[in-house]
Amino acid sequence: MERYIAPLDPRVERTHVRYRNRFGILLAGDLYTAKDMDRTARHAAIVIGAPYGGVKEQGPCVYAGELAARGFVALTFDPSFGGESGGEPRHTSSPEIFSEDFSAGVDFLGTLPYVDRTQISALGICGSGGFAISAAQTDRRIRAVVTASMYDISRVQARGWEDSMTPEERGAALDALAAQRWRDVDAGAPEYVPAFPEVPYDEVPAEITGVDREWFTFYATRRGHHPRARGNFTVTSSMAFMNYPLASHIDEISPRPILFLIGENAHSKWFSEYAYREAKQPKELYVVPGAIHIDLYDDVSKIPFDKIEAFLRAAANQ
């Protein structure tokens, strides 16, 4: 089903592509290029990852369409085990493989004759921000990193919200996951419980409140709903994130630059703020006035595309 949450810029063409990551998983992607792009020259490119549990037809299509119109070659993709990409069991989450998916995008872009291999960057929205950081720590082909409303899934799983998890709570969580592993063994398949409805709401039910209401406002209404992005992962996927800190070597991305984009009113600001503190120069934390977390998924009136373009152009000249 082709259901993109934003219209395609008439100046841009979108091509479905398929390529494999180093685990042999076939990834489904979309390649965005300007229709008038000079294909005899080499251009800067960018790999764009979806929010955690999202697909390429959601936020990534918004960023890719705009950046392609500005002259970049942009690649979006469905993460392994989700969307139209391969991988079994479905809805599995893996910090290593999701980080590898960014590097696989770099591989693919580097095969295109009109892409400059020295000018390939990564942009991660929400959870993909953490995976883009993770990939760039070891993949020095990634020229620069942009995160938008970043979530570090490993940090919140291993330490709790704002690092509030006690050792006793962590132990209880690991005990629960161990018990779930046995249930999965006995059932013959890992448990997966989707978070969002199969059919989108016209309006989010009043009983859904707090941060959950924000997620439902995007994923469960026509604004951002997609049938291949119903939220959550297999329950035992959490085990890997409790043992795999995504940003533990963020300081080693330097001297390659990082741009952290956060909404002024985003509940998730602390993820970017701590990552910014731990990263070395060059780095920038850019606050979008009045924005909440999900605004940086698709609200083109708030996503600072001029800032992103200027950052990427400057990185190309470093």
Image: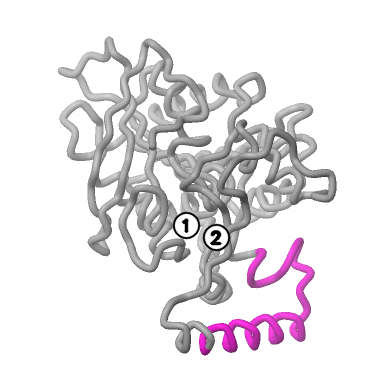
- For residue 123, side relative to residue 216 (left or right): left
The main secondary structure of the magenta stretch is helix
Q: In this view, does 77 lie above or below 189?
A: above
Residue 138 appears anywhere in the view: no
At mark 1, the secondary structure is helix
What separation in Å lies between label 2 and label 1 (alpha carbons)?
Answer: 6 Å
Amino acid tagged 2: Ala
Q: Residues within 10 Å of mark 1 (few under 14, many from 20)?
A: many
The N terminus, quarter of image: top left
| Residue 281 placement (x, y as % from top left) | 56, 44
| Residue 156 placement (x, y as % from top left) | 67, 64
Query: Relative to the observer, which residue lies in front, 31 or 249?
Result: 31
Marked residue nearer the N-terminal end (2 or 1): 1
Q: Is residue 275 above or below residue 36?
A: below
Amino acid tagged 1: Ser
Q: Residue 247 carries which label?
A: 2
- Cβ atoms at labels 2 and 1 below 8 Å apart: yes
Q: Residue at x 35, y 35 (%)?
A: 75
Q: Is residue 22 above or below residue 12?
A: below
Q: What sort of colour scheme is used for the picture?
A: one colour
| Residue 244 placement (x, y as % from top left) | 51, 71
Q: Which residue is drawn at 32% across and 25% down?
A: 14
At mark 2, the secondary structure is loop
Give the residue number, with chain letter if any, for mark 1: 134
Asked if residue 169 lies in the magenta stretch, the reply is yes
Q: Residues within 10 Å of mark 2 (few under 14, many from 20)?
A: many
> What are the residue bounds of the magenta stretch?
156-182
Q: In this view, does 38 lie above or below 280?
A: above
Residue 303 appears anywhere in the view: yes
| Residue 18 placement (x, y as % from top left) | 24, 44
Q: Which residue is drawn at 61% across and 32% down?
A: 222
The C terminus, quarter of image: top left
